[in-house]
Image (cartoon, grey):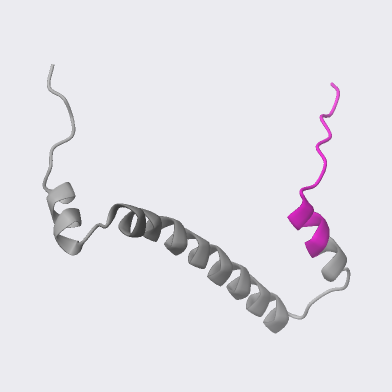
Amino acid sequence: MSEIIQPLSNVQLEILKAFSHNLDSNELLEFKELLGQYFAKRAIKSANKPWTEKGWTDKTVEELLNTKLRKKN
């Protein structure tokens, strides 16, 4: 059975270069928290995009929550 080899992403390569040494448990935890904060910030920015682009308000979201979008057959 042949193995499929995929190249590493640019992010993976940078992380490997930056952390070519072992971190102690506290440093590793801090690093994981930093990554989590980064991706959470990106997710929030992405979620906020429709609010800005479409001019949504709390009322708009409330209306969306109370709208049935499923079609009946």
Q: Is residue 3 magenta?
A: yes
Q: Quadrant of the N terminus?
A: top right
Q: Residue at x 64, y 77 (%)?
A: 29
Count the marks: how many?
0
Q: Is residue 18 magenta?
A: no
Q: Residue at x 30, y 52 (%)?
A: 54
Depth check, front residue: 22 or 15:
15
Q: Residue at x 52, y 62 (%)?
A: 42
In the rendered image, residue 68, in percent from the top left (x then y), is placed at 13, 37
Q: Quadrant of residue 17?
A: bottom right
Depth check, front residue: 40 or 30:
40
65 relative to 41, above or below: above
68 relative to 13, above or below: above
Looking at the rendering, the stretch of residues picked out in magenta corresponds to 1-15
Q: Quadrant of the C terminus?
A: top left
* Predominant secondary structure, magenta span: loop
Q: Quadrant of residue 70?
A: top left
64 relative to 31, above or below: above
| Left or right: 27 as drawn, with respect to 42 | right
Q: Residue at the far bottom: name it.
A: 26
Depth check, front residue: 25 or 69:
69
Depth check, front residue: 63 or 53:
53
In the rendered image, residue 11, in percent from the top left (x then y), is placed at 74, 56
